[in-house]
Amino acid sequence: MAEFVQRRVEDLIPELEQLERVGLLTRGEVRSVIKKRTSLEYKLKRRVVEKEDFIGYVQYEINFLELLRKRRQRIGYSFKKDEIEYVIVQRIHQLFGRATNKWKEDLQLWMSHVAFCKKWNCRSQLSKIFSSLLAVHSDKPALWIMAAKWEFEDQLSTESARHLFLRALRFHPDSSKVYQEYFRMELMNAEKQRNEKEMLDKAKMDVGEAGYSDAILNGELARVVYKAAVEKIKGAEFHLSLLTIAKKFQFLEELQKEILSDLQTLHADDPVTWDFLARQELLIKAPLPAESTPKQAKVQEAARQEERCSQVYETALSSLHTESMWDLYITFCLERYKRKTNSKQLKQQRMERLLSAYGKAHEAALLSPARYKEWISLLVELGQMELAIDVSSAATDRFGSSVDIWRIRLEVLIAVKVGDVEQVFKKAFTEVKPKDSPPLWTIMVEWSEKERSAGDTEALYQKLVLNPVVTKTMKVKYLDWTYRTQGYKKAKKVFSSLHENRPFSEEFFQKMIDIEKEQEQSKMANLRECYERALREFGSTNPDLWLSYIKEELSHSDGKPENCSTIHWRAMKVLQGENVEQFINKYTLLQTGHL
């Protein structure tokens, strides 16, 4: 092994001598480079070679290249690049080649080689890399697209790019992304050739020998790609994506009309089609009366556009009565309602249209839970509380298992302070799954704290701390409520009654620690008890808890700094994995006064 390494190192000597001769490296630096490369070569000759060994060697050589570039700029020397940089670049290619040959499935390794080639303008090498890469990773459409784009944009080879796209479609006949990019490439090629021909015409040069094809110039090749794509891949969204691409090219009016016509014919029953057609009305500007002021004209135009959009949606809903169609219509109405305007009339029209859409979708039983939430929130915002109560009641009747719907209904009832809220809570808990009920219990205890007697609230808390679904959250809230309403002694009793009843949360112990600290004469013995109980439960996973304990011993008037070493020793024994390193780092910062 040593002789192979020695021979490779000796091959590097002429290159390093050249670097020393031209003043890019000193003799000491040459020795350092030889030593480092020898070490890296030995790593590659081991019986078991790790991928990191190749990566480390490549990174060293890339850094070396960057150093030479900066040295050249500093001393103003730009000669002998073929004898220096070219040799290093070739060595990096060889290292990448050996690595990717050994770990063919590692895509990140291939991408690193591609990035290196692009940075150092290794065009011929990059073509070979893409060829090898696609032979191994032919199952990834994104790689085919990347290779084709490079051929088209960097190599200026339309034929090679087209060939790659066609090969990609043989491997991925159902890939919408490949079809989209192939379509875009053909359009870009047509636009480029049209621009070239226009420049030649302006220069009055003969374009007969340039080989410009009318089929390409008029977008006929792109049309062939489009036809093949929509025949293979169904769906209005894909069809629209092709139309969006075509609209970026001004010379394709006929193709754009054809795509739009096909969209209306092939996908007349797709809500996405109608949504697109409706929104197109926003782009149409009709002539306005001459007597209107600019502001009035703008408002009138917006109102007419939105009215035409609404009519298209209404037409669609007459034949396509589905939840998704209503959802798109409401989305449109909501977007327009949220748009800022100084016109009260336009704002009122948008609000009425939105509320009408919500109401009609509700009557048709085609409103989703998310839309009910939006509707109720809007009604509350507008101050229509009675209607909000009715809508929320209807929503819970339809979606009884949705905790979000029950939550918003309860919030509305509590805000208005009407109806039997407690009965609604009981009904909610019978319909919502127990595992989903914690948000409702939280609302209930907060409501009880404000509206019911202290005895009823305490009885509720005592019941909930025994409920395994919400016990962790309720222990913290119970302790906090008791301290706020009945003082420290009662809170201490509650803590004592709960500190042995698992499961716990860290917040439960932290809340008691905070309560102890708030007392005028805070007792360190009580704080130690809280910390010890917390560490018994969470000491193996929470390094910050140990640090807080140490800081308490250091800062409290009754603390014992001599206990810190014992606490540190215990922490190092209990903590595991990354938590140990975090604890050591933070403890060091604490000792140096930076924490």
Image (cartoon, helix red, strand yellow):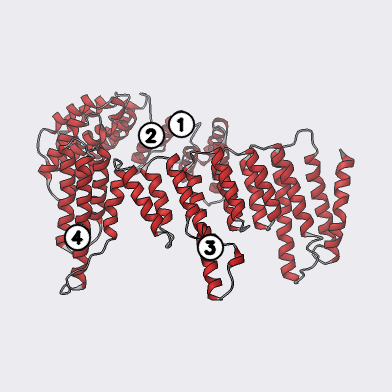
For label 2, the residue is 509
What's the amino acid at mark 1? Phe
Q: Is mark 3 on a helix, strand or loop?
A: helix
Residue type at mark 4 is Arg
Q: Which residue is drawn at 40% across and 53% down?
A: 244
Q: What residue did someone put label 1 on?
A: 538
Mark found first going from the N terminus, 3 or 1: 3
Quadrant assignment for the N terminus: top right
- Precedes in sequence: disc 4 or disc 1: 4
Count neighbours of disc 1 (C-alpha within 10 A) and say few if under 14, some if 14 to 19, many if 20 or more.
some
Residue at disc 2, secondary structure: helix
Q: Which quadrant of the view contains residue 396?
A: top left
* C-alpha span from label 3 to label 1: 66 Å
Q: What residue does disc 4 label?
A: 304
Q: Which residue is drawn at 56% across and 45% down?
A: 166
Q: Under tag 4, what secondary structure?
A: helix
Tell me the distance, in whole angstroms, between the alpha carbons under discs 2 and 3. Answer: 70 Å
Amino acid tagged 3: Lys
As displayed, is residue 507 above or below residue 80? above
Front position among marks 1 and 2: 1
Q: How far apart are marks 1 and 2 (CA)?
A: 10 Å
Q: Is residue 504 left or right of residue 568?
A: left
Inspect the image, locate mark 2, and give the three-letter code of the amino acid beneath it. Answer: Phe
Which of marks 3 and 2 precedes in the sequence?
3
- Above-or-below relation of 160 to 547: below
Task: Please name the residue that numbered disc 3 is placed on.
Answer: 192
Quick one: 20 or 35, which is closer to the camera? 20
Question: Residue 122 at what x, y percent from top left?
Answer: 70, 56
**What is the x, y in percent for residue 287?**
21, 68
* Mark 4 or 3, nearer chain start: 3
Q: Is any atom of residue 595 visible in this view? A: no
